[in-house]
């Protein structure tokens, strides 16, 4: 990897440049640590806005920012574009596609991947939305299917091409359903005047009895009402069993014919090979109150990949969202700086729930804060403001704000471009 070893500095390797990994990389003291950040991409992705890339609301460079540009202090800092395929805890070494590297401390911030719950057919044919390439695939597929619907004379095929099924009623599923519904109402009729857009159906499937399980009942009801108003067909207590590329199969022999199934039903930790079963719980790396792995004192896990079950309010671990990741990244950087640089005692990690939110469409959103719940226009403004200030980079904020202002008055999504056509897999016969 061409990284020199400095004898008086401890080498800290951070795998993953998401919300958690970046916080640690930015705040570790460079006079005491040599920091090596490794990621498969050379950019950080603001994942909460991926659905806007998928629905042609924003271009991908609006929610991505160069890692090298984020961390400008290059003293004792190295970034490597690489894929880590194995960790040798015995040798204290990582193995990647560009070489191997030893560590004094290892921080796992690999985030999460889509969880298909072992269903290989769904994994093959449904579309995930966890990365920018996946969001671009979805954008291309949506536009390609409308182009194909214009050409076919088969009514059954046309209906299948214009039917969208979103599996998962969490924030991602709700926001995506709302965005597609607004495209149907305000954008697509003008793009495709010779196509009857009323034949477009948007289904939102949720396995539990309500939407937005992590939010209040009041906010869940508001989201449900807003989506129904926009014409989204909502299925509650609906467990998806299979998908062959054309037909979604559910319990009680219910079926939906669709060429477009978007999987937003769950995630699991992105665990690198090298750990045993006793290190893993709930598809995540088990850690103690200090974010240290159970068996290795010099290996830490933070963000979506970490599993801490000591908090009685979160018996299944902290939510796999940006908030816990950012807080854990800040906490771990502070701890490592204190222990190795200032010889101070450290306190266990305590998660502070700052609230949660979801937007359903123009002037429609819900926000749950510890002492306040908002809905409607005010919640939508708060949602926009928080997401805007959370974006990395001044340019990204300006571009996102400009796009939102234009779309507010004109519903004009100017990035409806098929730059990279998506080729779907053939159905199972």
Image: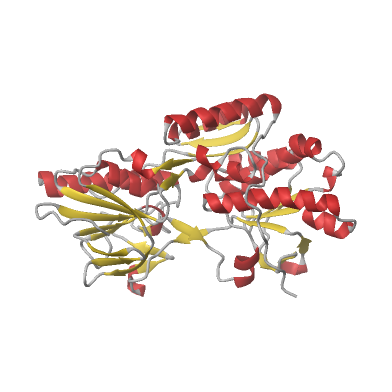
Picture layout, residue 103 above or below residue 57 = below
Q: Position of residue 182 (x, y in %)?
A: 71, 38
Q: Residue 3 appears at what percent x and percent y?
A: 22, 56
- Which quarter of the image is occupied by the C terminus? bottom right
Disc tally is 0
Colour basis: secondary structure
Please identify the quarter of the rendering in which residue 370 is found: top left
Q: Quadrant of the N terminus?
A: bottom left
Between 123 and 67, the one lying in front of the other is 67
| In this rendering, position of residue 368 left or right of residue 14 | right
Residue sitting at 64 percent across and 52 percent down? 138
The residue sitting at 68% across, 60% down in the picture is: 238
Give the left or right position of residue 176, taking residue 197 as reference.
left
Q: Residue furthest front?
A: 2
State the image coordinates of residue 269 (x, y, percent, origin top left).
43, 61
Name the residue: 34% across, 45% down: 22
Give the vertical position of 198 relative to 429 (above or below).
Answer: above
Looking at the image, residue 332 sits to the left or right of residue 122; the answer is: left
Is residue 112 or residue 32 the one in the foreground? 32
| Any part of residue 210 in sight | no
In this view, the residue in front, 224 or 385, is: 385
Q: Residue at x 63, y 26 (%)?
A: 406
Q: Quadrant of residue 92?
A: bottom left
- Residue 15 percent coordinates (x, y): 33, 56
Q: In this rendering, does residue 371 appear at all?
A: yes
């Amino acid at each position: 990897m061409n990284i020199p070893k400095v004898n008086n500095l401890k080498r800290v390797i951070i795998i993953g440049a998401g919300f958690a990994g970046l916080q640690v990389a930015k705040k570790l003291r460079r006079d005491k640590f040599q920091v090596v950040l490794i990621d498969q991409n050379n950019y950080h992705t603001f994942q909460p806005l991926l659905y806007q890339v998928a629905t042609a609301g924003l271009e991908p460079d609006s929610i991505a920012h160069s890692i090298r540009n984020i961390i400008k202090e290059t003293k004792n800092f190295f970034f490597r574009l690489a894929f880590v395929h194995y960790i040798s805890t015995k040798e204290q070494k990582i193995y990647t596609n560009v070489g191997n590297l030893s560590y004094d401390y290892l921080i796992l911030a690999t985030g999460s991947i889509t969880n298909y719950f072992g269903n290989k057919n769904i994994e093959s044919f449904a579309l995930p939305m966890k990365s920018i390439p996946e969001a671009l695939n979805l954008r291309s597929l949506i536009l390609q299917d409308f182009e194909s619907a214009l050409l076919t004379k088969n009514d059954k095929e046309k209906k299948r091409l214009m039917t969208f099924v979103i599996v998962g009623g969490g924030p991602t599923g709700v926001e995506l359903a709302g965005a597609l519904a607004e495209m149907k109402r305000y954008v697509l009729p003008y793009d495709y005047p010779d196509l009857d857009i009323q034949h477009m159906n948007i289904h939102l499937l949720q396995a539990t009895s309500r939407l937005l399980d992590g939010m209040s009942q009041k906010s869940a009801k508001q989201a449900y009402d807003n989506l129904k108003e926009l014409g989204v067909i909502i299925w509650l207590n609906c467990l998806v069993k299979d998908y062959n590329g054309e037909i979604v199969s559910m319990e009680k022999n219910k079926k939906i014919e669709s060429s477009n199934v978007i999987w937003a039903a769950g995630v699991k930790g992105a665990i690198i090979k090298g750990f045993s079963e006793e290190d893993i719980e709930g598809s995540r790396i088990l850690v103690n109150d200090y974010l240290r792995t159970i068996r290795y004192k010099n290996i830490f896990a933070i963000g979506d990949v970490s599993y801490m079950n000591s908090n009685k309010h979160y018996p299944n671990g902290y939510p796999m969202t940006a908030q816990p990741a950012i807080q854990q990244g800040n906490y771990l950087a502070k701890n490592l700086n204190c222990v190795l640089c200032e010889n101070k005692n450290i306190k266990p990690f305590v998660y502070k729930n700052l609230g949660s939110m979801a937007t359903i469409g123009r002037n429609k959103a819900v926000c749950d804060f510890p002492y306040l719940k908002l809905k409607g226009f005010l919640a939508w403004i708060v949602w926009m403001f928080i997401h805007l200030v959370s974006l990395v980079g001044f340019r990204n904020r300006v571009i996102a704000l400009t796009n939102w202002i234009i779309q507010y008055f004109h519903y004009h999504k100017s990035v409806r471009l098929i730059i990279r056509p998506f080729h779907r897999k053939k159905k199972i016969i």
